[in-house]
Image (cartoon, grey):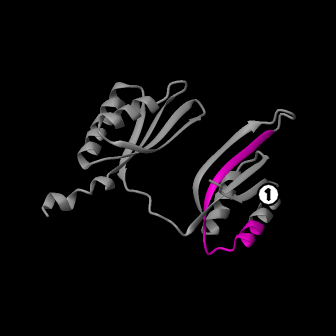
Amino acid sequence: MTDTDTTRPAPTENHLLINAYTTHPRSPLLAVSRRIADSGCNLVDTRLSTVGRDVSVTALATGSWDAVAKLEAMLSRLEREEDLKLVWYRTGAKPVQSNLLPYIVEVVASDKPGILYQLADFFDRQGITIESLHCSRYRAMQTGADMFSAQVTIGVPADMHIAALRDDFLEFCDHLNLDAIMDPMKF
């Protein structure tokens, strides 16, 4: 084993997390995914979302050390040449958490400040991780009321008593006047 072998991760350990932003209707997806492919990296996870007037792409690329270094150089050029805002950094693979059970939480309520914070705080105090989240504000068609909607995927520790958690969560939601459900994720 040479010194080079000890300083460079194995090919499967080279991960680059990329966040790209531009103004709607343009999308950074094509430009970023093209650079990932052209660099010899593989795109393993991607999220695209339009938030406000901007479109964002979060992408996780993997590849050999050299391919990831080439991708970083390509992203620097892309940021200079096109009207994109880019942030990227090297990261690692997500650790396997086989002790977590995936659950879906859906919440709908009259919009008011702090709902998302209160939801996040509830799960954090329980030792539950938020794996994914989508929330939005919209105007109800029938009444015109401002509404809040959230879809959250959580990781519940396998040793946690689910019925007690569900009872605590629904009591929490009742106290805040939130309409909510918590069900196991079905694949």
125 relative position to 91: left or right: right
Q: Is residue 115 magenta?
A: no
- Residue at 81% x, 36% y is 140
> Could you say where residue 120 lies in the image, as x and y percent from the top left?
64, 58
Q: Between 63 and 152, which is closer to the camera in this rendering?
A: 63
Q: Is residue 164 magenta?
A: yes
- Residue at 62% x, 59% y is 154
- Residue at 74% x, 37% y is 138
- Residue at 65% x, 55% y is 186
Residue to which mark 1 is pinned: 176
Task: Classify 22 as above or below 10.
Answer: above
Task: Classify 49 as above or below 115.
Answer: above
Q: Tag 1: residue type?
A: Leu
> Could you say where residue 5 lies in the image, as x and y percent from the top left?
18, 59
Quarter placement of the N terminus: bottom left
Quarter where residue 125 is shown: bottom right
68 relative position to 135: left or right: left
9 relative position to 60: left or right: left
Task: Classify 167 as above or below 30.
Answer: below
Q: Quick one: SS at disc 1?
A: helix
Task: Classify 186 as above or below 40.
Answer: below
Write the start and end of the magenta stretch as one range. 146-168
Q: Between 58 and 54, which is closer to the camera in this rendering?
A: 58
Instruction: Specify the farthest residue to the front.
Output: 187
Instruction: Specify the farthest residue to the left.
Output: 2
> Could you say where residue 149 lies in the image, as x and y percent from the top left?
72, 45
> Could you say where residue 36 lies in the image, as x and y percent from the top left?
35, 37
